[in-house]
Image (cartoon, grey):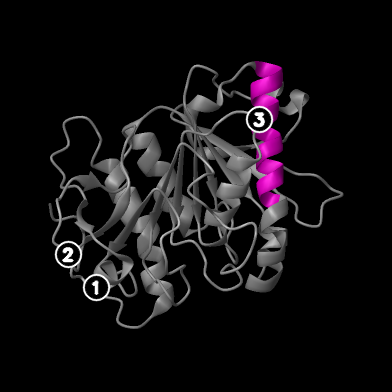
Amino acid sequence: MKQQNMKSKSQNTYSFRDNPTQSQPLLPSQASILASAFNYNRRTVITIHSYGDGVAGNFNAHLVPAYLAVEDLNVLAVDWRPGASSYTPGLANVPQVGAVVAQFVNLLENDFGYSTANIRIVGVGLGGHAAGIAARSTTGTIPHIIALDPSLPGWSHNIHKLTKNDAQLVEVIHTTAGHYGYDKPLGDIDFYPNGGSWQTGCGTVVSCSHTYAYVYYAESLRADIPNSNAARFIGTACNSFEEATNLGCDGERDAVFGGNLEKSNVSGIYSFVTNITPPFARD
């Protein structure tokens, strides 16, 4: 999406299996949608990057191929690079990004009859909060949000932060909890891999642990490729946030992080332990 009068310009680029490597601009207008190859019979995933990133960054480099490997769908990558050059302007522009994404979704639903039931929104860092804003601002209900290590600085008392009420299911993974990433649970179901604060193999390098949020998620998607024998990230239920961060959980192993399958009636706080090298899942 791109609007010249916006402080935070954003643009959707569009991908699907018939066009897996060359993105196409897709603006929030009837003319742009009509001229595109958007397929109304496919599900749609909307990805929202964080600050200092763009549609060609590592986040989408991991997620787009993983999604297209598991399902033939529309992938819309929101490009808001001009408003996300660094953290402070990115933080200020997140509400606007969410509003523009909602504008686009509402256009799809109201003018083209495309149901919001077919849409999933995935955001990383600041994009995790933008995903919540977008979902709560649509006229229809978004069935599933995945927030990958949503940001902490500036969000503790922010009225726009992600909440479990933003979609039918809000799924969150915390990989730098209490550092760059939000510490306390935010969704219907929250996962804290390896305690949630530092990831195995990253030491105390926060940026490394942060990237593992989407690395794990991309691996979880590929585990749902038909006939795949890959392990899945199976969480152990925790009684509290403190148990999760101390790896003291001993409840049922009855929840799977990520993946491409529909989920319902799942909630709670979960932890899981990963391998130090790929594949990371060790069910």
Point out the stretch of residues depicted in magenta.
97-112
x then y, percent, for residue 117:
50, 26
Query: Within 10 angstroms of label 1, few (less than 14), some, or many (20 or more) residues?
Result: some
Q: Main secondary structure of the magenta part?
A: helix
User: Which disc number belongs to residue 275?
Assistant: 2
When the figure is inspected, residue 197 is found, relative to residue 240, above or below; the finding is: below
Circles 2 and 1: CB distance less than 8 Å? yes
What kind of element bears circle 1?
loop
Q: Amino acid at mark 1?
A: Thr
Tell which tag, 3 or 1, sits nearer the viewer.
3
x then y, percent, for residue 204:
34, 83
When the figure is inspected, residue 217 is found, relative to residue 140, above or below; the finding is: below
Instruction: Between residue 150 and residue 160, name the one nearer to us.
Output: 160
Q: Amino acid at mark 3?
A: Thr
What kind of element bears circle 3?
loop
Query: Disc 3 or 1, which lies upstream in sequence?
Result: 3
Q: In the image, is 43 to the left or to the right of 160?
A: left
Q: Amino acid at mark 2?
A: Asn
Q: In the image, is 136 to the left or to the right of 264?
A: right
Q: Circle 1 sits on which residue?
A: 200
- The residue at 25%/34% (across/down) is 225
What is the distance, in whole Å, between disc 2 and disc 3 at their CAs? 42 Å
- The residue at 59%/23% (across/down) is 37
Query: Within 10 angstroms of label 3, few (less than 14), some, or many (20 or more) residues?
Result: some
x then y, percent, for residue 76:
56, 38
Q: Circle 3 sits on which residue?
A: 139
x then y, percent, for residue 231:
15, 47
- The residue at 24%/46% (across/down) is 256
